Image (tube, helix red, strand yellow):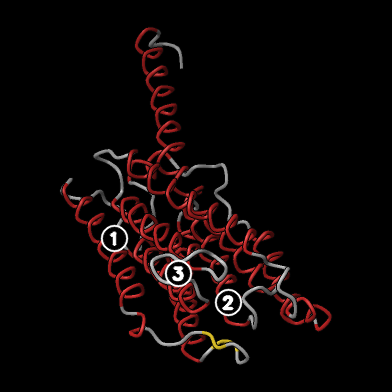
């Protein structure tokens, strides 16, 4: 079991800032979900189509896509010999997620044709594909050793694999949509296939969250806390998408909003591990060097 943390990072101590799991925020988000789900007075919000219009969906998805691409850019360009392999996996995994989310955004009902006409089913297929890639990526990060990759070429193989997965998903949905089961029927709502697909995502995220929580208990760390928060919020998002009856209703809005929050925490994890932590280690090393120099110049001074 491992996280983004490298052995060097653990040697100088965990990053103090943000190393605690944001339990209060997670509790508030869970409470909001339960209120939306269980409050009958909110049922009227599911009847209209103006609560979650196309513009709102496009804005939220654009933000999520940009964050996913930033996760890749920051992780990829912060490469070093001591960089944990989990960072590369997270970078390439979320590059694929961002690209698939882009197809989801363009496939949303009301958008112009993206090779094939936009539809609810098409958008849902791309959504589920992106969520599975994200969940599997987080699970691999939670399971894998934090040791650096043994060969520099491995990062390019991981990148190629993520792009290949993306290409296969694009091709099958755009060229052979009949290969996918029906996910939504007007007048009926979500199909059993859609609900079971969401359950599968939640189970993957639940396992990843448990592994990250165990790791956090053993060694409190900012990137672990952020990844745990992202995983839990992602589970709440998927619960919203198991229960909505209208793609424009309040649960759909909440689910997309939770996804944006989850992506934010993933970016925080990458930023702490790839950008902030190296500078903090450098400060510690410089302070130790200054103390050593003072000890050499003034050996009698403690």
> In the drawing, what numbered circle is on residue 162?
1
Residue designated by label 3: 131
SS class of the residue under badge 3? helix
Q: Cβ–Cβ below 8 Å for labels 3 and 1?
A: no
Q: Is 38 in front, or is 297?
A: 38
Residue located 71% across and 64% down the image: 28
Q: Quadrant of residue 140?
A: bottom left
Crowd tier of the residue under label 3, counting other residues whose Cα lies within 10 Å: few below 14, some 14–19, many 20 or above? many
Q: Quadrant of the N terminus?
A: bottom left
Q: Earlier in the sequence, mark 3 or mark 1?
A: 3
Question: How far is disc 3 from disc 2 in space, using C-alphas?
Answer: 11 Å
The residue under label 2 is 241
Instruction: Kindly state the secondary structure of the residue where label 1 is placed.
Output: helix
Compared with 54, 252 (above or below) is below
Between residues 233 and 175, which one lies in front from this camera angle? 175
Name the residue at the right extreme.
41
Rendered residue at 32%/56% (across/down): 89
Disc 1 crowd, CA 10 A, few/some/many (<14, 14-19, 20+): many
């Amino acid at each position: 079991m491992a996280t983004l943390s490298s052995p060097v990072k653990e040697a100088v101590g965990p990053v103090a800032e943000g190393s605690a799991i944001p339990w209060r925020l997670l509790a508030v988000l869970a409470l909001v979900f339960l209120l939306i789900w269980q409050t009958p007075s909110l049922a009227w919000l599911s009847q209209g189509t103006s609560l979650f219009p196309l513009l709102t969906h496009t804005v939220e998805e654009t933000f999520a896509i940009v964050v996913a691409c930033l996760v890749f850019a920051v992780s990829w360009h912060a490469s070093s010999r001591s960089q944990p392999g989990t960072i590369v996996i997270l970078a390439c995994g979320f590059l694929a997620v961002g690209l698939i989310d882009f197809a989801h955004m363009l496939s949303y009902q009301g958008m112009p044709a993206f090779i094939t006409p936009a539809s609810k089913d098409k958008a849902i297929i791309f959504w589920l594909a992106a969520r599975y890639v994200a969940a599997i990526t987080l699970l691999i990060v939670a399971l894998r050793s934090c040791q650096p990759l043994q060969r520099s070429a491995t990062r390019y193989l991981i990148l190629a694999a993520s792009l290949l997965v993306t290409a296969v998903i694009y091709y099958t949905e755009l060229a052979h949509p009949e290969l996918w089961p029906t996910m939504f029927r007007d007048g009926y709502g979500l199909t059993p296939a859609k609900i079971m697909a969401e359950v599968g995502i939640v189970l993957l995220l639940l396992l990843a969250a448990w592994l990250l929580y165990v790791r956090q208990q053993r060694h409190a760390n900012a990137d672990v806390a952020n990844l745990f928060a992202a995983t839990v919020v992602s589970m709440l998002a998927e619960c919203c998408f198991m229960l909505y009856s209208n793609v424009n209703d309040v649960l759909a809005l909440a689910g997309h909003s939770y996804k944006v929050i989850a992506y934010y925490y993933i970016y925080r994890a990458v930023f702490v591990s790839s950008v902030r932590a190296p500078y903090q280690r450098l400060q510690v090393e410089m302070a130790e060097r200054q103390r050593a120099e003072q000890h050499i110049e003034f050996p009698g001074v403690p």
